[in-house]
Each structure stands twice: as structure tokens, then as C-alpha cells.
Amino acid sequence: MTLQKLYSYTRQCINQFDLIQDGDKIAIGISGGKDSLALLYTLAGLRKFLPQKFEIVAITADLGFGEFDLSQIQKLCEELEVEYHILKTDIADILSQKIQKGTYCAMCAKLRKGAINKLAKEQGCNKVAYAHHQDDMIETMMLSLIYEGQFYTFGPKTYYKEADITVIRPLINIPEKQIIGFRNKYNLPCVKNPCPHDGVTRREYIKKLIAQISRENPGVKTKMYNAILKDKIYEWD
């Protein structure tokens, strides 16, 4: 996928779901993976082209799981003229004390997002952008269905009253394979996730399950995504 196509996908999503308004200051959550770096690229570029005038900053939460070299991402932010903050946390220690067995993805995600939201507010941001793509949306729906017994997934835009911040997801129209193509074409400086549970989570199982279903039923992911949008199984705001 070319940068121009990434711009096109993202602009379409922003317009479709009314994600960005004049005067917004948006914190981009940077995990170090391909998705968040693609989001960084597209929002940094779209500042010049969208009619809405907005600012962006980038934030990475270092959870404390081990070595996490972010120097290349720091360099990329400088090249894109994006202010970058690395937030040191003790989330890994908190998780090890609270959860002795099994994975702790849900609590980790909650603590990480809470830390990012807090810093975003301190930086004067009214929105946080996360790089969830189309496959993430489908996988979350399947996770909720299989493990929680409910038909639910996240929406493109959610306002969190307690934090007084709006979360937006400008990449949800983009299939993951397109982002992989963008990563490969532009040699994104991805950083490996130091989490000890990376690759062995329920989400990884669901990803493999959907891949198997897709091989046997071509086009099924598009149908799932269209069903989510058509039936609006989440709150939009």
C-alpha cells in the first residue's frame, strides 16, 4: 500500500465517522508496531491536506517489561515533525503483583490506556487516536462472542466521560494486509513488543481461527465487517 492510498483510506474514515474537528489536539498512541506507525505517518501527513486544522503529539507507554529501544521511533517523529513523549510506567510490576497465573491482557490494556489518557490531558489533548484496523475490529467481535457471550466490538469514536477524552480509530476501514504492505514498502522502524505474553493470547488464537474460516470461506471478513457496521453493535459516541 502506498502512502497516498493510506491517506485516502484514513481520510475516508475521518469523514465517514466525523473523527476530527477544527482545533483538535490528538495524542497518537504508539506501541512500536506497524499499525501505530502507519497511523503516525498518515495523521502527520494529513495535517497538511485536511480542511480541519488539528495538532498531534505521539505517546509511547513503556510498561517496564524489559528492553524497549525507541530511538528509531524518536528519529521518525523528528523527521515527521511530531512531538514525541515516552512515558515510563511500572505497569509490569503492578501486573506481576496482582496476577500470578495466566495472561493479564485486559488489565494491562486498561492501565496502559489510563496512563496514556492522563498524559494526553496534561499535554492539552482532547482526543487520543489508536491504530486499530479492520481485522482488530472483527477479532474483538469474535472474542466478545466466544469468551463473553455478547455481540460487541469497539467503535470508530468513543467518548470516555471519566477521563473527559475522546478515543478515535482512523484506520478501522483498512484490512491488516494493507498495513503489512505499507510497512514493507516504507521499511517502518517497528519495535518488538517486550511483553512475555505477546503471540500467546486469546486474540492470537482468534486471529488464527478467523484465518482458517477465511481460507474455507473467501470474503468472510468483509461480510463480518459489513455486518458490524450495518447492525451498529457498539455505541458510536
Image (cartoon, grey):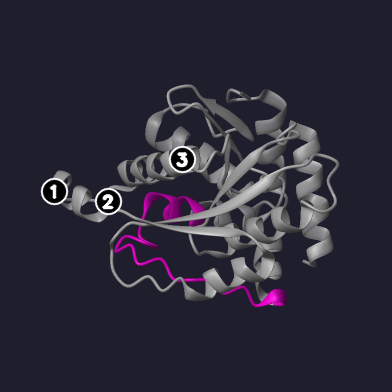
Is residue 160 shown to the viewer in this render? yes
Residue 23 is situated, as x and y percent measured from the top left of the image, at 71, 35
Name the residue carrying label 3: 122
Of the residues under marks 1 and 2, which one precedes in the sequence?
A: 2
Name the residue carrying label 1: 97
Q: Is residue 70 above or below residue 117?
A: below
Query: Could you tell me which residue is drawn at 27 percent across and 51 percent down?
Result: 91
Q: Quadrant of the N terminus?
A: bottom right
Name the residue carrying label 2: 91
Residue 86 badge:
none
Q: Nearer the viewer, residue 172 or 22?
A: 22
Is residue 63 on the magenta stretch? no
Disc 1 secondary structure class: helix
Give the quadrant of residue 19.
top right
Q: Nearer the viewer, residue 154 or 158?
A: 158
Of the residues under marks 3 and 1, which one precedes in the sequence?
A: 1
> Looking at numbered disc 1 in the image, what kind of residue is underneath it?
Gln
Disc 3 secondary structure class: helix
CA neighbours of label 2 inside 10 A, class few (<14), some (14 to 19), many (20+)? many
Is residue 194 on the magenta stretch? yes
Magenta stretch bounds? 185-208
Q: Quadrant of the C terminus?
A: top right
